[in-house]
Image (tube, grey):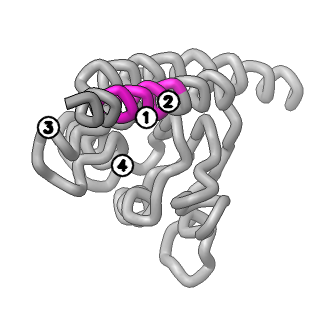
Amino acid sequence: MAEADDSDRGVRDRFFMGFAMAEACAARDAGEVPIGAVIVKDGEIVGRGHNQPIGLRDPTAHAETLALREAARRVGNYRLSDTTIYVTLEPCAMCAGALVHARIKRLVFGAEDPKAGGVVSIFTIGSSSSLNHRIEVAGGVLAEEALVLLQSFFRARRNSSDDSQSDREMD
């Protein structure tokens, strides 16, 4: 029976991560780093967000914080117990701390972030026994797709920068 539950969970995780990937594409299309998040409660998306720190001129406007704000409004409580957040990239330390404060039950992320990961790569904020809440963490869901999206975004940005540099050198 546990295997069926694990299989169902895996299917559900990939399904909802698809919505987070759509949010990441919206960020990319707006010229923001392509990271997306959705929060699910009882099988329904109650919050969604994508990176918008440039557009909103807000350094805290990460996908996770925007999804948390929407979910809290919709649920009517800042405590988001019994929810799962799906994020395309491992949350940073700021976002991991916000997930703990919101009492998120479960975090599912795509790719690990070896430079700024706040959950498994650099810090372990979600599982720290020093904090009053711990988050169940599952990583690697649609990780390849998330990584390809990020890499192609930064490659295009570098190429655009190289083209601008070449144009200036020709003047």
- In the image, residue 82 above or below residue 156: below
Please give the range of residues in magenta. 152-164
Label 1: few (<14), some or many (≥20) within 10 Å? few
- Residue underneath mark 1: 158
Residue mark closest to the camera, 2 vs 4: 2
Q: Residue at x 47, y 22 (%)?
A: 21
Q: Secondary structure at mark 2?
A: helix
Task: Describe residue 124's horizontal placement relative to residue 157 as left or right.
Answer: right
- In the image, residue 130 above or below residue 119: below
Question: Which residue is at the front of the view, 109 or 170?
Answer: 170
The three-letter code of the residue at mark 1 reads: Arg
Task: Describe residue 32's horizontal placement relative to residue 35 as left or right.
Answer: left
> Real-space Cα distance between discs 2 and 1?
5 Å
Q: Secondary structure at mark 3?
A: loop
Label 3: few (<14), some or many (≥20) within 10 Å? few
Mark before the other along the chain sequence, 2 or 4 = 4
- In the image, residue 63 above or below residue 43: below
Q: Residue at x 49, y 76 (%)?
A: 132
Mark before the other along the chain sequence, 3 or 2 = 3
Mark before the other along the chain sequence, 1 or 3 = 3
> Real-space Cα distance between discs 2 and 4?
36 Å
Residue mark closest to the camera, 3 vs 2: 2
- Residue underneath mark 4: 80
Q: Residue at x 51, y 68 (%)?
A: 133
Q: Secondary structure at mark 1?
A: helix
- Residue underneath mark 2: 155
Residue mark closest to the camera, 4 vs 3: 3
The three-letter code of the residue at mark 3 reads: Gly
Q: Is residue 47 visible?
A: no
- Residue underneath mark 3: 55
> Real-space Cα distance between discs 4 and 1?
39 Å
**Is residue 31 found inside the magenta-colored segment of the image?**
no
